[in-house]
Image: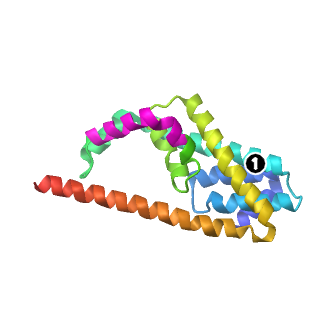
Amino acid sequence: MEWIIRLMEALGSPGAGLAVALENLFPPVPSEVILPLAGFTAGQGRISLLAAILWTTAGSVAGALVLYGLGAWLGLDRVRRIADRLPFVSVSDVDKADAWFDRHGNAAVFAGRMVPVVRSLISVPAGVSGMPIVRFTLHTAAGSLVWNTALILAGYALGENWELVGRYLGWVSTAVLATLAIAIARFAVSRLKARRS
């Protein structure tokens, strides 16, 4: 956390934006820590509240675009070939996921920006499925603006107690990870049963 404080001290609001961009790519320090800290810093008058919101949203979009680019580079055909070599995944699974993303991609990207863990992951399938980059950017910016504003304002309002935001949202992150782990385990078990029958 010290490096985030140093970034904001050295660069002001752009430092908070850079921290959020890096968090998208290397998520050991989540936005649940960065954003309330930016709000607390704004509450102390060291950075502008509006600038913190705008710069962190720009950072969110920048980080998401890098992951979108990774997904676009992988592409649907390459993901299909990879799936064909994996033990529990089939090409039809990839096609179903792609069809689902075609139908629900806008909502998935917008809402996904407000869900811990999913925030970073959602950009990759958007790139793989070929979601138009302008549409992806707009939905990413809108979802990020809502999330960033809420957490920055929470840190601003809580003042010295800004760390409470990260503590409570840490439980949400744990629940999301547990849900993903259970879903993957159920998927693997169902595939094993299908192969044995």
Horizontally, is 181 left or right of 19 in the view? left
Find residue 63 and report its horizontal and vertical position in percent.
Answer: 61, 45
Is residue 6 something that shows in the picture?
no
Residue 132 part of the magenta-drawn span: no
Find residue 167 and report its horizontal and vertical position in percent.
Answer: 63, 70
Instruction: Tell me the chief SS of the magenta region.
Output: helix
Q: Quadrant of the N terminus?
A: bottom right
Q: Quadrant of residue 188?
A: bottom left
- Residue found at the very far right of the displayed protein: 45
Q: Residue at x 76, y 44 (%)?
A: 54
Horizontally, is 98 left or right of 44 in the view? left
Along the line of sight, the residue nearer the viewer: 154 or 133: 154
Residue 95 part of the magenta-drawn span: yes
Q: Residue at x 58, y 47 (%)?
A: 113
Horizontally, is 195 left or right of 11 in the view? left
Q: Residue at x 34, y 57 (%)?
A: 184
**Considering only vertical position in the picture, is 77 above or below 52?**
above
Q: Quadrant of the C terminus?
A: bottom left
Could you classify mark 1 by the number of other residues whose Cα lies within 10 Å: few (under 14), some (14-19), or many (20 or more)? many
**Considering only vertical position in the picture, is 171 above or below 70?**
below
Mark 1 highlights which residue?
53
Q: Secondary structure at mark 1?
A: helix
Find residue 195 and report its horizontal and vertical position in percent.
Answer: 14, 53
Which color scheme is applied?
rainbow
Is residue 33 something that shows in the picture?
yes
Horizontally, is 90 left or right of 51 in the view? left
Q: Residue at x 52, y 35 (%)?
A: 106
Count the numbered circles shown.
1
Q: Which residues are magenta?
A: 92-109
Find residue 83 and report its horizontal and vertical position in percent.
Answer: 29, 44
Along the line of sight, the residue nearer the viewer: 135 or 87: 135
